[in-house]
Image (cartoon, helix red, strand yellow):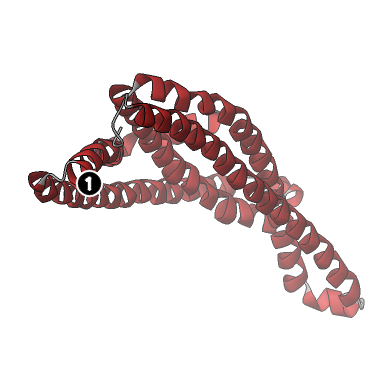
Amino acid sequence: METFQRLFMMAKQYYMRFLFAAICMVVAGGLQSALPLIAKPAIDEIFMSKNIDALKWIPLAIIAIFLFKGLANYGQTILMSSIGLRIVTDLRNKLYEQIQKQSLSFFAEHPTGLLMSRITNDVQAVQTASSEAITALVKDTFMLIALVGVIFYMDWKLALIAMVVFPLTIYPISRFGKKMRKVTTSSQITMGTLNSLLQETISGTRIVKAFCMEKYESERFAAENERLFKYSMKAVSVNAISSPLMDFLGGLGIAAVITYGGYNVVQGHSTPGT
């Protein structure tokens, strides 16, 4: 949370870009949630009632929705990426200025490769948090609220059944998020150590060769590289588990909705479009 607060303070000067990006996100999320409203008349009027007038306007409405949703997504991607890249640029400049102000003892305690990793790899990771994460948070939150509203408008009982699955996703999302942050932090530290080792051995090649330390340095590098591989595989494992689990929970919700909705259609209480 503290990291996002600092990012917010740095992003304040770009508030106009963020405002327009937020508008694009809201538009994209709203248009995405409008698709279920189009699906109902498409099924009921075209396929069930064979209404020729509906066949004229519904396809045009669907084309318009996808066209403007695509434009809104393009706008928010460009705007949020520019904000993220600008924050990264500003942060690198500030970090470099702070490093230049440090004493010689600071450089003795912190390896060169580690400092280089902080300015390059770690700062680059901030871009994801400042653009992709914020985009997903704003757009997906609005889209979720809009979709819930649409579902309640169409059938509140069906909406309640769909909402039962939502609390089940909170724990795994929180669990996997904490795990991913821990693995990512370990990977960044290991990458910094690896960069430091590279810088030391390459710049000190003459010393390494003078003392016949080639094998020793190769083993050191291989050990750190193996650690990086293991942390990277842990990140892959977390992603590999989280996606199927979320799909399964989503499948439970879909199965429940189809069961309830199908029963109502069979009993004549609602139309297939609902």
Residue 221 located left or right of residue 80: right
Residue located farthest toward the left when viewing the structure as drawn:
53
Foreground residue among 92 and 53: 53
Query: How far from the left and from the top, in percent, is residue 39?
Result: 26, 41
Q: How many discs appear?
A: 1
The residue located at (41%, 47%) in the rendering is 84
Query: How far from the left and from the top, in percent, is residue 25?
Result: 30, 39
Which quadrant: the N terminus? Answer: top right
The residue located at (28%, 52%) in the rendering is 74
Q: Quadrant of residue 112?
A: bottom right
The residue located at (77%, 56%) in the rendering is 230
Which quadrant: the C terminus? Answer: top left
Q: Mark 1 is on which residue type? A: Phe
Q: Is residue 8 above or below residue 214?
A: above
Q: Is residue 21 at least partly visible in the picture?
A: no
Helix, strand or loop under label 1: helix
Residue 110 located left or right of residue 132: right
Foreground residue among 60 and 25: 60
Query: How far from the left and from the top, in percent, is residue 266?
Result: 37, 31
Foreground residue among 244 and 41: 41
Q: Assess disc 1: are there few (<14), some (14-19) or many (≥20) residues with their C-alpha within 10 Å of its C-alpha.
A: some
Residue located farthest toward the front when viewing the structure as drawn:
267
Residue 242 located left or right of residue 136: right
Residue 41 located left or right of residue 274: left
User: Which residue, given by chain and number where applicable, does mark 1 sit on?
Assistant: 47
Q: Is residue 116 at least partly visible in the picture?
A: yes
Q: Is residue 211 above or below residue 31?
A: below
